[in-house]
Image: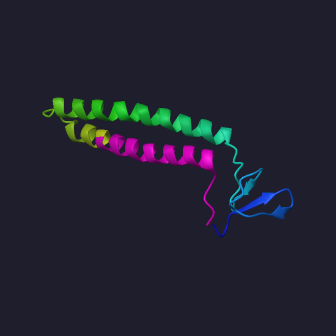
Amino acid sequence: MSNIYKIDNTRIINPYIVKYQVWILPVDPIMKTDKTLLITGLKYIAYTVALMFLAPVVIYQAFKNQEHPLYWPVLVIGLLLGVAAIAMGFYSLKVILDSLFGKRKK
């Protein structure tokens, strides 16, 4: 409790008294959501969901047509779409968390 103080009006009081106290925290307790960044994160989530459905379909089509000459290119495209879905998932969660809690200070 070294960084947290309880203040009653203008003087510091005993921490065991629980009457009309205001907590002063070392961080800013009022954090507002960045709505434009949140909308961007939700758009990225939509792209992620689309990639999550598209990648398995492309991989399935590649495995279904193994004797076709375009088997390997279609399989590689499907695998790249799967990796992109995973990467977009992490990135979209990062953008949404940044919009809710703010960017980390280094």
Residue at coordinates 17% horizontally, 29% vertically from top-left?
64
**Foreground of the two, 99 or 70:** 99
| Residue farthest toward the bottom in the current orientation of the protein | 2
Does residue 91 show up magenta in the picture?
A: yes
- Left or right placement of residue 25 versus residue 82 in this view: right
Residue 56, given in percent of the width and then of the height, sits at 28, 33
Rendered position, 75 above or below 12? above
Position of the C terminus by quadrant: bottom right
Which image quarter: residue 34?
A: top right
Rendered position, 72 above or below 58? below
Residue at coordinates 75% horizontally, 51% vertically from top-left?
19
Residue 66, given in percent of the width and then of the height, sits at 14, 34
Residue 24, given in percent of the width and then of the height, sits at 73, 58
Does residue 52 show up magenta in the picture?
A: no
Which image quarter: residue 86?
A: top left
Give the magenta-colored segment's residue range.
79-106
Position of the N terminus by quadrant: bottom right
| Residue farthest toward the front in the current orientation of the protein | 17
- Left or right placement of residue 92 versus residue 8 in this view: left
Residue 92, given in percent of the width and then of the height, sits at 50, 43
In terms of secondary structure, what is the magenta stretch mainly?
helix
Which image quarter: residue 88?
A: top left
